[in-house]
Image (cartoon, rainbow, N blue to C red):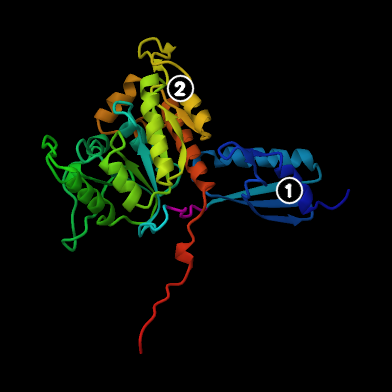
């Protein structure tokens, strides 16, 4: 019986596919250390995205693969750490203090369930172990206060900066916290732009891995402001399968391409309708639309979410599906979609600005 070598262990790990990154553990550069002591092996992995709920399954698969390839191994220990880093943003912009990554959730068209999707993704990322905030960037039609069940107004300790509201372990900010729910925002573009800047830059976000930004539909002033003045690490397009929604989704995707914000993927919402009485599933808005647009533009389809009565009811009650029914199949789909989203971001270029020293030139 020969000695176990590191190369043999790496060869075994090369057969283990990480499903969110869709490549093997060696190619994904997740293996940080392999320790061998006689016939015992310890493998230390570091993932760049939160996936706490599947770590146990990942450990079991790795242990099985190593012991199958190397019968001489009497014990295989797997340790998994999560290290979420800041990723590159648009040229000329710096990441926000206390926010590693801003992720824009967008749709070219209204009525596709973008806000409900955004809040459930934020809650899913938090459930997977990340520090998450949500910014409601829809000045004319803010939804997040109702979706998160938050009432009241944000505090300001210095009279200048706002403290984020909190709900379900999320930090949240919205114009809806500052005005009455039935008050219309009759503002022109410059005022909307100024308010969005204030909500982004004058909120005391605290230690966020991700700031999920719920954009209004379309490609107007708010989207342009976000692209020019807010450091965005990536964007996600939410669409329904029907052709009329896909037309507008393409416009949103092309907009982010033009402003140099990487599109991390497509989410197909209302993919199928699930009857609340008999559980029959039917693609009432067509099928495969999200996959087709993803393939056309070379981005991943992050998830396909159903149209189901419970999603709407839970959202209206201020307790979205991920927290209202965390063990339900729909909540698990949201969590899987969120993991894929974060994994896609982890493959993007990192931001190294914080690592460079600040040089000040003074005249003495």
Q: Secondary structure at mark 1?
A: helix
Magenta range is: 83-89
Q: How many marks?
A: 2
Measuring 43% from the left and 49% from the top, which residue is drawn there? 233
**Where's residue 145, x and y in %?**
23, 39
Measuring 15% from the left and 61% from the top, which residue is drawn there? 159
Image height of 328 relative to 176, above or below: above
Which comes before the other along the chain, label 1 or label 2?
Answer: 1
Q: Residue furthest bottom?
A: 364
Residue count near mark 2 (Cα–Cα under 10 Å), binned few <14, some 14–19, many ≥20 = some
User: 248 left or right of 51?
Assistant: left
Q: Which residue is mark 1?
A: 10
**Where's residue 321, x and y in %?**
35, 30
Q: Confirm whether residue 268 shows in the render.
A: yes
Magenta segment, prevailing SS (helix, strand or loop): loop
Toward which corner of the image does residue 151 lie, by quadrant?
top left
User: 205 left or right of 194?
Assistant: right
Measuring 21% from the left and 35% from the top, which residue is drawn there? 141
User: 302 left or right of 139?
Assistant: right
Q: Secondary structure at mark 2?
A: helix
Image height of 305 relative to 176, above or below: above
Report how far apart the C-alphas of labels 1 and 2 lie in the structure: 39 Å
Q: Confirm whether residue 170 shows in the render.
A: no
**Where's residue 179, x and y in %?**
13, 43
**The C terminus, quarter of image:** bottom left
Q: Residue furthest front?
A: 258
Measuring 53% from the left and 34% from the top, which residue is drawn there? 298
Residue 275's tag is none
- Magenta span includes 279: no
Residue 289's tag is 2
Image height of 251 relative to 24, above or below: above
């Amino acid at each position: 019986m020969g000695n176990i070598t590191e190369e043999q262990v790496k060869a075994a790990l090369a057969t283990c596919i990480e499903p969110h990154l869709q490549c093997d553990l060696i190619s994904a550069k997740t293996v940080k250390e392999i320790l061998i002591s006689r016939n015992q092996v310890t493998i230390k992995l570091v993932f760049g995205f939160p996936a706490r709920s599947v770590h146990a399954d990942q450990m079991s698969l790795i242990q099985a693969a190593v012991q199958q390839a190397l019968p001489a191994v009497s014990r295989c220990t797997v340790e998994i750490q999560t290290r979420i880093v800041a990723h590159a943003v648009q040229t000329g912009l710096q990441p926000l203090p206390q926010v590693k990554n801003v992720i824009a959730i967008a749709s070219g068209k209204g009525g596709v369930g973008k806000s409900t999707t955004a809040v459930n993704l934020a809650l899913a990322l938090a459930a997977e172990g990340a520090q998450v905030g949500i910014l409601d960037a829809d000045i004319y039609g803010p939804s997040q206060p109702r979706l998160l069940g938050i009432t009241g107004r944000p505090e300001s300790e210095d009279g200048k900066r706002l403290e984020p509201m909190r709900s379900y372990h999320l930090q949240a900010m919205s114009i809806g916290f500052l005005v009455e729910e039935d008050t219309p925002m009759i503002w022109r573009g410059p005022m909307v732009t100024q308010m969005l800047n204030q909500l982004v830059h004058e909120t005391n976000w605290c230690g966020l891995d991700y700031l999920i930004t719920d954009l209004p539909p379309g490609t107007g002033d708010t989207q342009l402001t976000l692209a020019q003045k807010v450091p965005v690490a990536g964007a996600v397009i939410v669409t329904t399968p029907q052709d009329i929604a896909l037309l507008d989704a393409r416009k949103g995707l092309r907009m982010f391409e033009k402003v140099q914000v990487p599109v991390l993927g497509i989410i197909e919402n209302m993919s199928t309708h699930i009857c609340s009485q008999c559980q029959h599933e039917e693609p009432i808005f067509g099928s495969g639309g999200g996959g087709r647009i993803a393939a056309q533009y070379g981005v991943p389809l992050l998830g396909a979410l159903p149209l189901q009565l419970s999603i709407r009811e839970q959202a209206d009650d201020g307790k979205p599906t991920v927290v209202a029914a965390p063990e339900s199949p729909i909540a698990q789909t949201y969590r899987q979609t969120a993991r894929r989203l974060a994994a896609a971001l982890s493959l993007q270029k990192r931001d190294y600005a914080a690592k460079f020293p600040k040089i000040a030139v003074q005249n003495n």
